[in-house]
Amino acid sequence: METVRPHFVLFGDSITEQSFRPGGWGAALANTYSRKADVIVRGYGGYNTRWALFLLDHLFSLSCTAPPAAVTIFFGANDAALLGQTSERQYVPLEEYKENLRKIVKHLKESSATILVVLITPPPVDEEGRKEYARSVYGEKAMEHPERTNDNTGAYARQCVELAKELHIPSIDLWSKMQETTQWQKKFLSDGLHLTEEGNAVVHEEVVRVLRDGHLRAEAMPYDFPHHSKINSDHPEKAFEPKR
Amino acid sequence: METVRPHFVLFGDSITEQSFRPGGWGAALANTYSRKADVIVRGYGGYNTRWALFLLDHLFSLSCTAPPAAVTIFFGANDAALLGQTSERQYVPLEEYKENLRKIVKHLKESSATILVVLITPPPVDEEGRKEYARSVYGEKAMEHPERTNDNTGAYARQCVELAKELHIPSIDLWSKMQETTQWQKKFLSDGLHLTEEGNAVVHEEVVRVLRDGHLRAEAMPYDFPHHSKINSDHPEKAFEPKR
């Protein structure tokens, strides 16, 4: 009898923090792995990889007896903020972004020999959507220039994918994947940066695909306790005896 | 700086197991307590309180160093199955149901001096909805008589509420609450027993209310790490230094 189910940690910025909103990819993942694995959200809105490094020892203790079976690392949307614009305090240079991701992966690999680490690139940026959003929040005072551009975020996405290849770990190139669909700007993004329900569905589908490839297929994983149909109602204790 | 957020456990049958489906009350709770508390699902479809007792030592170890801050106990829909009908193997006598719930509460209280334990009654039963569901699954072979009745489930709900009063712990009388709304049968129940999105919303609202009354108000709980606006981008380390 399995008594402890594995857990997955979703580590990232606001796109991870919001993943349990209605239609969110985190909630969908928890449902896909119902009775099979726990899904733990560690999303920190506004965080870049530089700030994420401060969380590693707290969130992923190297002395932990039950490290996660899988972790998604989903940063870059804030690192790619442009210098000289309204979000510049979140900016992290391209090369440092890649090195920070490398440190995060290294830390996680040290916490467990079998952990599946998945890198996810930031989604594309709809600059027109960002402007509309800024106008809706700041009105006349909205910035003239975008604080993020799709091209610049694309450069970060490429570093993320490249690092995954170097480290032989799986990655999800969300930046490219989403742009394969026409009208991705409004279909997948709600404010030019965060995800609509359809955008969330893309992330869910991609994460499930990568977990399956990484031998974490929900259908193949055991229930953490017997299905009720396996319980003999005259002798229920038999279903709960430890396997010998 | 808070480094470990508290967690809530949802312990129950299929209505808990399914609570991370789209519109589910568990996912909604995780969203309400985003960055404040983890929501862990321990729902076991088809289980009654007699079988739930076998899980206690596994799920809620008395030697656990980090017991849950709150647990919802949401059983009874299966205990209230009728003898002599198709679901009779799940039947648990009314008095035993109450005593099993008492054992579960006692165990949880022993695991922690400060734990908030919340009893939830089974929802009402729409007998017509159950019949329609049975016909859709079994066709001609569908049972003539219902395997659950609303009156009988109501008796279990009353025992649940009575026990909560005896033990001075909060309860949610879902059976009564839902029937205050006209057309509750189709509005709140999808197959006469399980919850629609609107039914899930009722559970979410009630659980949040009880948690608030129990001093677990999301707004009053700390973020587990600083909000990004509190991080000095020139000296980010300051935001992550231990408080003295």
Image (cartoon, coloured by chain):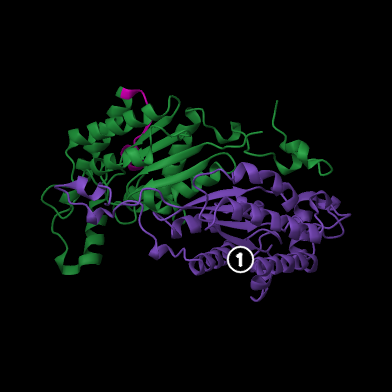
Chain colours: A purple, B green
Q: Is residue A64 above or below residue A219?
A: above
In the picture provided, is B129 more to the left or to the right than B144? right
The chain that hosts pointer 1 is: A
Q: Residue at x 56, y 37 (%)?
A: B5
Position in image of residue B162 (x %, y %)? 28, 28
The stretch of residues the image draws in magenta is: B167-180
Type of amino acid at the residue the image marks with label 1? Ile
> Which of the 4 quarters of the picture holds residue B161?
top left
Decide if residue B81 is in sight here.
Answer: no
Q: Which residue is drawn at 72% across and 37% down?
A: B240
In the picture provided, is A31 more to the left or to the right than B104? right
- Read off the residue under disc 1: A169
Q: Is residue B161 above or below residue A4?
A: above
* SS assignment at label 1: loop
Decide if residue B105 is in sight here.
Answer: yes
Q: Does the magenta stretch include residue B178?
A: yes
Position in image of residue B28 (x %, y %)? 50, 47
Q: Is residue A14 above or below residue B63?
A: below
Position in image of residue B118 (x %, y %)? 39, 33
> Which of the 4 quarters of the picture holds residue A37?
bottom left
Q: Which residue is drawn at 60% across and 64% down?
A: A199
In the picture provided, is A241 more to the left or to the right than B68? left
Residue lying at the far right of the rendered structure: A84
